């Protein structure tokens, strides 16, 4: 049988079969509906958290249904998932370099909306068909009729009698046509004769406003529908595109909200394309995934391990209790005790290498003068408390150095910039985890 601790990424998992553990400390802020920047390195669970709100996962994945108490839409959230790295953002930026900033803001804001409106229409249609969403036929017709008389509707030639699925296909055609315009660097004068000239996010806000007005009767039985746009891999946004995204966040209002996931902290989450208007603390929240304490991390590890063992039908191993199974000593404490008592030359060399490497700021040894905080690199937002670089272990990193040597990984030098050390740290940590998983293959039945 396959290991419950497989080395595959979430995205490569079997469709609709991903297991979920959703710590309330992380899940509840995302469910609150406030526009959010979700920050965390590779492998910290960003995509898993986003997918916990995605409508297809909630509809089809039994593991997610169980994690959400058997009623995945009780919070009224319809999540629309978009992976930004797959949507030709570089082509748009090359086009934008030739035009005024207000023109590029209007064009990219339109494209930004078309990225998710296509799947929004499909989601409402499919959830209604599954009899999970109560949407009277009359309400749907009134909604589409309102769309047909809007800027977007007139451009896409939407008819009042069209269905939601027809609307979705027309949005797709519009999105493709916009991308083609970017590829050929269409002159802006010609472009705005063919496409609506609107502000960033205006199309999306108007569509959701029409939906809230004309489909107000649409519910999951426990309250009104809320629309969450789940934007994964937001690192793909250029700085100029991110300013436009900031504008969309600043102007968004319920029942529409956005979650951006990113590996790195954005240097500027406040600037918008609108003069004298910036994103304030009350307009959004920043949720870091790598600032939890040891107790929260232990809860996360035990929770993830438990759901994976359940999925592999190894129920006799759950619930997972790390201290009960392995004691309170870390692997490096155990290795230190064993290697110190050993007379082997190899053991002495392992200790020596771990001691030398452990003094580097990369490994977070306390008391090192070159141990810098994140804010010294200008990566924190105003008002956010500085945090130290992540630690491997309070003990010498014996096991980590062993794996680094075995895998021939590159440890950054002590004088490397913080963001380089952070990136390398994330890469090595993930590769170490993969190597560990190879030693944890479940036995054949």
Image (tube, rainbow, N blue to C red):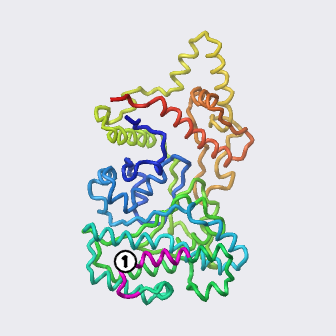
The residue depicted at 49 percent of the width and 53 percent of the height is 46
**Magenta stretch contains residue 168:** yes
Task: Magenta stretch: give its range.
Answer: 159-176
In the rendering, at what x and y percent does residue 425 appear? Answer: 61, 41
In the rendering, at what x and y percent does residue 78 appear? Answer: 37, 66
The residue depicted at 73 percent of the width and 38 percent of the height is 413
- Write down the quadrant of residue 432 in the picture: top right
> Is 403 on the left or on the right of 254, as rendered?
right
Q: Predominant secondary structure in magenta?
A: helix
345 and 140: which is toward the camera: 140
Q: Look at the image and tell me in which quarter the N terminus lies.
A: top left
The residue depicted at 40 percent of the width and 69 percent of the height is 227
**Magenta stretch contains residue 410:** no
> Is 74 on the left or on the right of 298, as rendered?
left
Indicate the secondary structure of the residue bearing disc 1: helix
In the rendering, at what x and y percent does residue 21 appear? Answer: 38, 47
Q: Look at the image and tell me in which quarter the C terminus lies.
A: top left
379 and 256: which is toward the camera: 256
> Is 103 on the left or on the right of 329, as rendered?
right
- Write down the quadrant of residue 163 in the picture: bottom left
- Write down the quadrant of residue 107 in the picture: bottom right
Q: Is residue 384 above or below residue 152?
A: above
Q: Residues within 10 Å of mark 1 (few under 14, many from 20)?
A: many
- To which residue does mark 1 refer? 164
């Amino acid at each position: 049988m396959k290991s419950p601790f497989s080395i595959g990424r979430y995205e490569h998992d079997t469709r609709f079969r991903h297991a979920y553990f959703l710590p309330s400390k992380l899940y509840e802020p995302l469910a609150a509906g406030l526009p959010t920047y979700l920050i965390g390195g590779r492998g910290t669970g960003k995509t898993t958290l986003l997918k916990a709100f995605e409508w297809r996962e909630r509809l089809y994945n039994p593991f997610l249904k169980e994690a959400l108490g058997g009623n995945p839409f009780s919070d009224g959230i319809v999540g629309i998932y978009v992976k930004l790295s797959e949507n030709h953002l570089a082509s748009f930026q090359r086009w934008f370099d030739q035009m005024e900033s207000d023109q590029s803001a209007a064009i990219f804001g339109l494209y930004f909306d078309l990225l998710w409106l296509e799947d929004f229409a499909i989601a409402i249609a499919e959830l209604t068909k599954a009899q999970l969403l109560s949407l009277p036929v009359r309400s749907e017709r009134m909604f589409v009729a309102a769309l047909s008389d809007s800027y977007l509707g007139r451009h896409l030639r939407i008819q009042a009698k069209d269905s939601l699925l027809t609307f979705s296909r027309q949005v797709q055609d519009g999105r493709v046509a916009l991308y083609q315009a970017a590829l050929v660097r269409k002159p802006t004068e010609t472009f705005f004769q063919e496409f609506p000239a609107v502000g960033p996010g205006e199309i999306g806000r108007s569509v959701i406003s029409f939906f809230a007005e004309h489909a107000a009767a649409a519910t999951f039985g426990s309250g009104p529908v809320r629309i969450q746009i789940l934007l994964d891999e937001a690192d793909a946004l250029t700085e100029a595109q991110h300013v436009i995204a900031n504008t969309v966040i600043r102007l968004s209002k319920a029942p529409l909200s956005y979650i951006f996931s990113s590996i790195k902290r954005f240097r500027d989450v406040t600037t918008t394309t609108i003069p004298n208007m910036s994103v304030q603390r009350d307009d959004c929240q920043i949720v870091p995934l790598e600032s939890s304490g040891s107790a929260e991390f232990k809860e996360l590890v035990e929770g993830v391990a438990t759901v994976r063992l359940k999925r592999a039908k190894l129920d006799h191993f759950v619930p997972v209790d790390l201290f009960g199974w392995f004691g309170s000593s870390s692997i490096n404490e155990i290795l230190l005790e064993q290697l110190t008592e050993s007379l082997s030359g190899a053991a002495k060399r392992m200790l020596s290498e771990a001691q030398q490497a452990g003094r580097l700021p990369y490994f977070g040894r306390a008391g090192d003068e070159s141990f810098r905080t994140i804010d010294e690199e200008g990566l924190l937002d105003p008002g956010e408390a500085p945090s130290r670089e992540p630690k491997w272990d309070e003990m010498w990193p014996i096991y980590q150095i062993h794996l680094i040597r075995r895998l021939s990984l590159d440890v950054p030098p002590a004088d490397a910039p913080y963001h380089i050390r952070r990136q390398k740290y994330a890469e090595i940590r993930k590769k170490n985890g993969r190597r560990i998983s190879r030693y944890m293959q479940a036995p054949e039945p």
